[in-house]
Amino acid sequence: AYNSAIDAFGYGEHWQQAFSFLKEMQTDYVMPDVVNYNATISACGKGKQWHLSVALLEVMQTRDVLPNVISRNAAIGALPRAENWQQAFCLLEGMQGCDVVLDMISCNAAIRSCED
């Protein structure tokens, strides 16, 4: 139920509600999994809240939820173009250090971050 709600908010670009649902899960003693975090990272990115997308990657690791390629691609894709290309490439490089396999989406998202 949480995943469906977070996804729905993400499609409607209501990142605040998606983020609130993630926090509510913890209040209800439901431990968010990688799918919950991925949906929230994506929703925050669509809402142009790139800083939250990147922060959620760090939160995942502190909560023993390992970010996967989808998590990292969503965070890289959330970064504003031409402004944070260094951050995009740091995230891309971090994928290799975490045994996450780069894919075409990862590379394309990082390249797009360099565009004006």
Image (cartoon, rainbow, N blue to C red):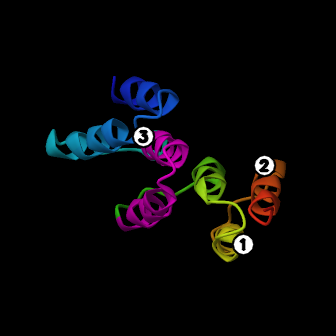
The answer to if 108 sits in the magenta stretch is: no
Nearer-the-camera pick, 92 or 48: 48
The residue that label 3 is drawn on is 36
Mark 1 touches mark 3? (CB < 8 Å): no
- Label 1 sits on a secondary structure element that is helix
Residue sitting at x 72%, y 67%:
82
Q: Position of residue 59 (x, y in %)?
A: 38, 63
The answer to if 49 sits in the magenta stretch is: yes
Q: Where on the picture, by quarter, is residue 15?
A: top left
Q: Is residue 83 left or right of residue 106?
A: left
The residue that label 1 is drawn on is 89
The secondary structure making up most of the magenta span is helix
Tag 3: amino acid: Asn
Q: What whole-number distance in Å separates the C-alpha atoms at marks 3 and 2?
A: 20 Å
Residue 64 appears in view: yes
Whichever of labels 1 and 3 marks the residue nearer the N terminus, that label is 3
Q: Position of residue 87 (x, y in %)?
A: 63, 73
Whichever of labels 3 and 2 marks the residue nearer the N terminus, that label is 3
Residue 30 appears in view: no
Q: What whole-number distance in Å separates the C-alpha atoms at marks 1 and 3?
A: 24 Å
Nearer-the-camera pick, 20 or 31: 20
Q: Is residue 21 above or below residue 84?
A: above
Q: Is residue 87 above or below residue 68?
A: below
Q: What whole-number distance in Å separates the C-alpha atoms at marks 2 and 1?
A: 13 Å
The residue that label 2 is drawn on is 105
Tag 1: amino acid: Phe
Q: Position of residue 77 (x, y in %)?
A: 66, 52
Tag 2: amino acid: Ile
- Label 3 sits on a secondary structure element that is helix
Number of numbered discs visible in the structure rendering = 3
Q: Is residue 13 left or right of residue 88?
A: left
* Dot 3 crowding, Cα within 10 Å, few <14, some 14–19, many 20+: many
